[in-house]
Image (spheres, rainbow, N blue to C red):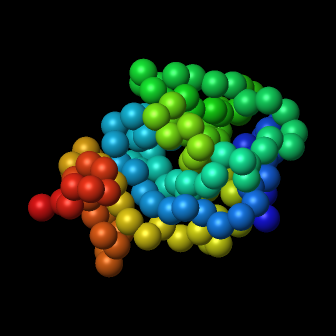
Amino acid sequence: MREGGCLCGSVRYRVDGDPVSSGICHCVTCRRAASAPALPFAQFAVSDFSFTRGEPAAFRSSPHVVRTFCGRCGSPLTYQNDRHATSIDIMTCSLDDPNTLPPTFSVWVSHKVAWDAVAEGLPAYAESRSEPAD
């Protein structure tokens, strides 16, 4: 079991089980949602995830994607794609101990800002994991 939440503590969550994957996204939408050069995430089965305190705000950032965040402090918390309804991504750095889920790949490196460095030694993909970077 892992726990996490927002900066101010208004929203907390718990996730059980092992992650399906753990990566770093460099896409424009993730960068803007996090106000950071990249956004680390870990994907879990939605059945293993639950909010334990508070209710997050939700924002549809693209036609098939809903992101949640704390409505008080703004911390990004989750990402869900309607096309993959059985999974949920949590923002790795919202975990109480993000060191337990190191990333194993980078995606959307074709969108990264020029001064950002992709994590060395990890597989990098131009877009999704089905498209290797040059």
Count of marks overlaid on the render: 0
Looking at this view, name the residue that lies furthest to the left.
Answer: 134
Looking at this view, name the residue that lies furthest to the right.
Answer: 53
Position of residue 88 measured from the top left corner of the image (x, y, whole percent): 59, 45
Q: Which residue is drawn at 87% across and 39% down?
A: 53
Examine the rendered structure and indicate whether residue 128 appears above or below residue 96.
Answer: above
Position of residue 81 measured from the top left corner of the image (x, y, whole percent): 50, 35
Q: In which quarter of the image is the N terminus?
A: bottom right
Examine the rendered structure and indicate whether residue 117 appears above or below residue 57.
Answer: below
Work out whether residue 75 can be spotted.
Answer: yes
Q: Which residue is drawn at 35% across and 60% down?
A: 106
Q: In the drawing, does residue 41 fall left or right of residue 9?
A: left
Q: In which quarter of the image is the C terminus?
A: bottom left
Q: In the drawing, does residue 82 fall left or right of residue 49?
A: left
Examine the rendered structure and indicate whether residue 54 appears above or below residue 98.
Answer: above
Q: Residue at x 49, y 55 (%)?
A: 40
Position of residue 110 measured from the top left corner of the image (x, y, whole percent): 21, 49
Examine the rendered structure and indicate whether residue 43 appears above or below residue 105.
Answer: above
Position of residue 58 measured from the top left corner of the image (x, y, whole percent): 63, 25
Work out whether residue 7 can be spotted.
Answer: no
Q: Which of 42 and 26 is in front in this view?
A: 42
Looking at this view, name the residue that lies furthest to the bottom.
Answer: 121
Q: In the drawing, does residue 121 fall left or right of residue 57?
A: left
Q: Residue at x 43, y 70 (%)?
A: 104
Image quadrant assignment for residue 115: bottom left
